[in-house]
């Protein structure tokens, strides 16, 4: 049985394919179209999934999408009536709904086939139910509490549930206009980070400040006795005026969310090119601290209500790795699972899983520990691209030769693009599309930003660590498959890891497991033999663009930046070989 899952007409558009309940591939449209957070219909992702599996759309049994326009329909109508003065807002929402409900014709048009040529019907799965499913049904738990929390989806922002076996029972939800994601996004805009998906910048900035304004934050997002929360709507305009949104075939855009009252109480918003002051840093710290307080308020009530010790978390707010790293310390939960794509791209997988288990009643049997679901290329295909680009290279005779030479370059201080296996699904490079550097280089952050990334200096870089050494280097020990948690690095280890230790002594780690990522594990282990460090600095292989997907994109990135080498499967390209190609 094949199920094609979609996230369409929303940010981070994506597609996946399940075969008998197992994820066989998944990809975000941005990786193919090369536009960050691409919103619209994921036609290229669908084509990839079908071609990769060697099937056509006529072989697909079910098609799901993580959107249900019928959910909370009465509330949606009432909200729209309140905004009748904003005709553009109404027009945009109606247009978006029409597209969501006409997916079969969109699929047919995108694939160049007739609707009658495939039998699968479209199944609309509510947004947050898709998030819940994306976490629980691929977790190691037979029973767990589940939290989905983000901006909005199908008029809800938060949903709590219990998962048992192949069923999820929804317990409660927070609906429009109340949203922790809206709170965080509004302050992200206020702090001068205007683009869709910029919230991680506030998280990265927050350790540079002190949470001096938490008392004011508590007035904006109020904790409720039922374990949930509500917004003071006067700080926002989304419920009264509506917010301009663009979800059509390009980079998504969300207009200003915060109201004049926020300006009155917190001062003039920062321009995106304005210098960051200590006030901005303290404000970021306050937003992050209160966001964490709200999350732990929800989780502690959920734990007491269910009595369960396992927790699964999904939704855009689940990408807050700083909060994730504190869950087991600040709640009574004992084990946690967060999927690689907790944000909206993951609803493609979640909607398919919901239909397979919740609706069709199939038996669960699959625990997901890797995110390698995207495109992959052979050495021969890579060689053709290198020759086409007139790039000099060396092809190693084996993986072990590639690993030995790459580890030596890293030990010698090189900045290397590492392109291996299938592209990761989710926002993190996890050792298949990564830029790697020696974590002991004190100049590594400046080096990467000047040579490749050209990003804000306050943003940290992450450590990939062999699983067996986590307890030696971090104050907490856990499996962190998807770089989804931030832990404190042990004090005595920080001086030796300046490149991956954030200003507050933390690191957003990825635990590398031999049976999950064998080639990446072997590279780090060989690096350990040479340097004594079982860790590499790992950041995404890109330059202000989506993470590279195709060998040509990796080669182009190498040629226009100043990284020292790229390793594409077993083909090694170094800067001194190709100085004339720059």
Image (spheres, rainbow, N blue to C red):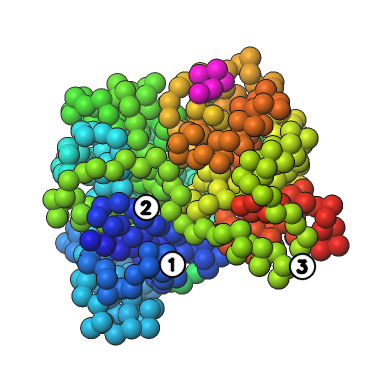
528 left or right, relative to 267 = right
Furthest toward the front, the residue is 397
Residue at (48, 33) in percent of width and height: 513
Residue at (75, 39) in percent of width and height: 409
Q: Report the Cα–Cα distance between label 1 and label 3.
A: 27 Å
Q: Earlier in the sequence, mark 3 or mark 2?
A: 2
User: Percent position (x, y) of residue 138?
Assistant: 30, 43
Residue denoted by label 2: 346
User: Percent position (x, y) of residue 95?
Assistant: 33, 75
Residue at (74, 33) in percent of width and height: 411
The front one of 83 and 30 is 30
- Local packing at callout 1 (Cα closer than 10 Å; few below 14, some 14-19, many 20+) is many
Residue at (20, 56) in percent of width and height: 355
Q: Is mark 2 on a helix, strand or loop?
A: helix
Q: Is mark 1 on a helix, strand or loop?
A: helix
Residue denoted by label 3: 390
Q: Which of marks 1 and 3 is nearer the N terminus?
A: 1
The front one of 345 and 211 is 345
**In the figure, residue 118 lies in which quadrant?**
bottom left
What residue range appears in magenta?
Answer: 468-474
Depicted 145 relative to depicted 97: above or below: above
Q: Of tags 3 and 2, which is closer to the observer?
A: 3
Depicted 103 relative to depicted 25: above or below: below
Query: Is residue 504 highlighted in magenta?
Result: no
Q: Report the Cα–Cα distance between label 1 and label 2.
A: 17 Å
Can residue 347 be spotted in the picture? Answer: no
468 left or right, relative to 336 = right
440 left or right, relative to 522 = right
Residue denoted by label 1: 48
**In the figure, residue 558 lies in which quadrant?**
bottom right
Q: Is mark 3 on a helix, strand or loop?
A: loop
């Amino acid at each position: 049985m094949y199920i094609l899952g979609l996230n369409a007409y929303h940010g981070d558009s994506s597609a996946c394919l399940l075969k008998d309940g197992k994820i066989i591939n998944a990809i975000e449209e941005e990786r193919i179209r090369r536009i960050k957070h691409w919103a619209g219909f994921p036609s290229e992702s669908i084509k990839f999934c079908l071609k990769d599996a060697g099937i056509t759309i006529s072989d697909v049994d079910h098609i799901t999408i993580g959107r249900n326009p019928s959910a909370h329909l009465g509330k949606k109508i009432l909200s729209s009536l309140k905004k009748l003065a904003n005709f553009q807002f109404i027009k945009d929402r109606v247009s978006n709904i029409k597209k969501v409900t006409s997916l079969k014709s969109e699929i047919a048009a995108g694939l160049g086939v007739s609707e009658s040529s495939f039998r699968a019907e479209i199944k609309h799965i509510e947004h947050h139910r898709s998030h819940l499913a994306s976490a629980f049904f691929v977790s190691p738990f037979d029973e767990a509490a589940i939290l989905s929390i983000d901006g909005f989806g199908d008029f809800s922002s938060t949903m709590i549930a219990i998962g048992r076996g192949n069923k999820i029972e929804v317990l409660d939800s927070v609906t429009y206009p109340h949203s922790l994601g809206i709170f965080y996004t509004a302050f992200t805009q206020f702090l001068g980070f205007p683009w869709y998906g910029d919230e991680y910048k506030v998280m990265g900035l927050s350790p540079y400040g002190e949470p001096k304004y938490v008392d004011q934050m508590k007035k904006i997002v109020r904790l409720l006795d039922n374990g949930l929360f509500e917004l003071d709507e006067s700080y926002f305009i989304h419920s009264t005026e509506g917010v301009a949104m663009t979800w059509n075939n390009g980079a998504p855009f969300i207009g200003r969310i915060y109201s004049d009252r926020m300006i009155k109480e917190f001062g003039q918003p920062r321009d995106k090119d304005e210098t960051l002051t200590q006030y901005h840093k303290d404000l970021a710290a306050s937003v992050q601290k209160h966001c964490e307080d709200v999350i732990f308020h929800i989780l502690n009530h959920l734990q007491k209500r269910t009595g369960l010790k396992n927790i699964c978390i999904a939704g855009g707010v689940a990408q807050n790795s700083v909060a994730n790293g504190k869950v087991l310390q600040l709640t009574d939960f004992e084990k946690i699972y967060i999927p690689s794509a907790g944000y909206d791209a993951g609803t493609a997988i979640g909607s398919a899983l919901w239909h397979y288990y919740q609706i069709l009643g199939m038996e669960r049997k699959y625990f997901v520990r890797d995110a390698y679901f995207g495109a992959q290329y052979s050495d021969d295909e890579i060689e053709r691209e290198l020759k086409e680009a007139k790039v000099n290279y060396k092809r190693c005779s084996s993986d072990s030769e590639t690993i030995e030479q790459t580890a030596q370059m890293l030990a010698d201080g090189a900045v290397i693009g590492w392109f291996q296996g299938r592209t990761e699904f989710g926002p993190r490079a996890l050792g298949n599309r990564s830029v790697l550097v020696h974590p002991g280089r004190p100049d590594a952050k400046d080096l990467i930003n000047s040579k490749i990334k050209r990003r804000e200096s306050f943003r940290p870089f992450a450590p990939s660590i062999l699983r067996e050494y986590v307890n030696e280097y971090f104050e907490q020990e856990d499996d962190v498959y998807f770089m989804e948690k931030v832990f404190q690095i042990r004090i005595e280890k920080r001086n030796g890891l300046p490149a991956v230790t954030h200003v507050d002594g933390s690191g957003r780690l990825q635990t590398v497991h031999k049976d999950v990522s064998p080639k990446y594990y072997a590279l780090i282990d060989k690096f350990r033999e040479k340097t004594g460090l079982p860790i590499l600095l790992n950041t995404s292989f890109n330059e202000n663009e989506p993470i590279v997907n195709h060998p040509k994109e990796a080669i182009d990135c190498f040629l226009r930046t100043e990284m020292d080498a790229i390793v594409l499967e077993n083909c090694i390209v170094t800067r001194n070989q190709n100085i004339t190609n720059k």
